[in-house]
Amino acid sequence: MKNHHSDKRQRIQCGIAMICILMTLFGIQAAESKDSAPVTGGEIKASLYATPHHLNPAIQSGLATAFPGAQIFAGLVRYDNQWNPHPYLAEKWDISPDGLTVTLHLRKNAVFHDGKPITSEDVAFSIMTVKAHHPFQSMMAPVGKVDTPTPHTVIVRLVKPHPALLLAMSAALLPILPMHVYGSVEKVRDHPANMNPVGSGPFRLKEFVRGKHILLEKNREFFIKDRPYLDHIHIKIINNLQEESMSFEVGDTQLMLSFHNLKKMRYLSMLDHTVTLTDAFKGTGPIGWLAFNLRKKPFDDLRVRKAFAYTIDREFIVRTLFEGQTNMETGPISSHSPFYSKDVNLYPQNFKLANKLLDEAGYARDANGRRFAFRLTYIPHKTGNFFQICDYLRHLFLLKLGVEANIENPETFTEWAGKVSDWDFDVTLDSAYNWGDPVIGVHRTYFTSNIRKGVIWSNTQGYSNPVADKLMEQAGSEPDFRKRHALYGQFQKIITDDLPVYSLYERKMLLIHHKDIAGFGQSIWGVMTPLDNLFWKGDTP
């Protein structure tokens, strides 16, 4: 990332007061030539790897929910691809000099899909819902209360400064819910409206058939004039990578998200009608890792976790399994983050030390040279390199440590998420997003207070370290970038020493679309942002 971009990001994330910022949404223009004037009409068909549990991002994280959710629900702020915030439902905002009060001034022309006006009460309700139910507990933890002095004025009162608050107001993280539909915060988690939501975003839900598709249609009462350009976004649920790739190749779909299968991606990128964006999801900071269940033997013993770390060759995974198309990750914070530190234990491969640690932990080899067995699971969607990595680890651990990894193959994402969130696992290979700022996407994995059974991508490892908790508390509310960077440096050392998870690689996220679609690549969130600016160039298909 260029230096001036990093500077902008640091100013945003460090909570420097932005007084009375007023920008028009038309500052976010399509990255096309001047002769590509927006065309109204048409449909985009996209593929999605998994059926979301529901369509409410206020209580569920992940791309499968956030992609359709950010179209159905509007947020308060939207971000461009240079980390700059722009007005959305909030047309301007003020931040007090002490960083403890954020005043939002709402649009007066915004209505929900059922015609009811959006008021400050809906915004307050949504913030408190996210605070109560979202897996990222730290994201809204600093919010003490929300005042609503007028129907279009919201005052967020914080108990401590929150450098990432504006980022957390993106639609994928803080969708504005209709209070008149849900009634109370306590009812949101199990409310039937999560399956048939009423939002205020650029698209309405027309049909949601689990396992098949999500059909979105144009919201003709959208509060941004002449948006969206498209009539429909049709999201097809396609779990099979071969089927998904073929669907894109023959034109049955025009938008595809990919993570790992490099051969497929290389082939598709060579097609005449294909555009591949490599940095469309730059805000997410995805890290692939091994996560240990610290409640269970043998992984309650740090020596065992360190033995695994000293056995794995991350360079081999990146160089061979990913053919050098990704990067190693060495700790809990993405290497693309301004808070990243490489001053941590890198665990160079050392089989002698690894075996010594297992001996010291009391796991001696038996007559057959075996020490113990454990279950190794992984997210099943678009498995590609996930299974290859598991298979590599299985052979490596058995050959070098005498440890048997029994690979579990969950059939669906839901099956995997259910087992891990209920703590019914030994070790899982999966990934998590940094979500732009450690307060949003990193803290939730390590805070003791976020050990929450039944909530995926929380602290499912059961990790608890009071020193790490304190460092996260301090860094999460420190407005000075240098001090914050130093605190996160200490935090990264502790996590890589304690190893509740062992970071392996940067999980590449690619966005592949038909060359005649304009408007992609305008946000740090990829498709987890309103797609009201997409249009077909020329005649719509």
Image (spheres, rainbow, N blue to C red):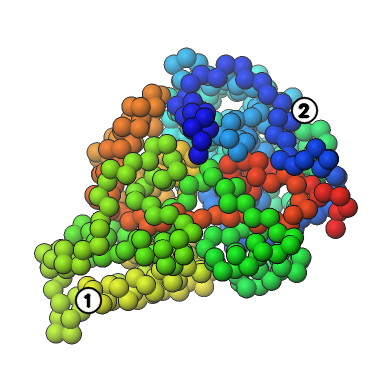
In this image, 50 relative to 297: left or right?
right
Which residue shows up at 61% across the image and 16% down it? Answer: 20
The single residue placed furthest to the bottom in the displayed view is 368
In this image, 217 relative to 7: left or right?
right
Q: Position of residue 524 (x, y in %)?
A: 58, 41
- Image quarter of residue 267: bottom right
When the figure is inspected, residue 31 is found, relative to residue 345, above or below; the finding is above
In this image, 37 relative to 303: left or right?
right
Q: Position of residue 266 (x, y in %)?
A: 60, 65
Q: In this view of the protein, can residue 453 be seen by the observer?
A: no
Helix, strand or loop under label 2: loop
Helix, strand or loop under label 1: loop
The residue singled out by tag 2 in the image is 109
The single residue placed furthest to the right in the displayed view is 539
Q: Amino acid at mark 2?
A: Asn
Q: Amino acid at mark 1?
A: Gly
Q: Nearer the viewer, residue 538 or 258?
A: 538
Which residue shows up at 16% across the image and 67% down it? Answer: 352
Q: Nearer the viewer, residue 497 or 460?
A: 497
Callout count: 2
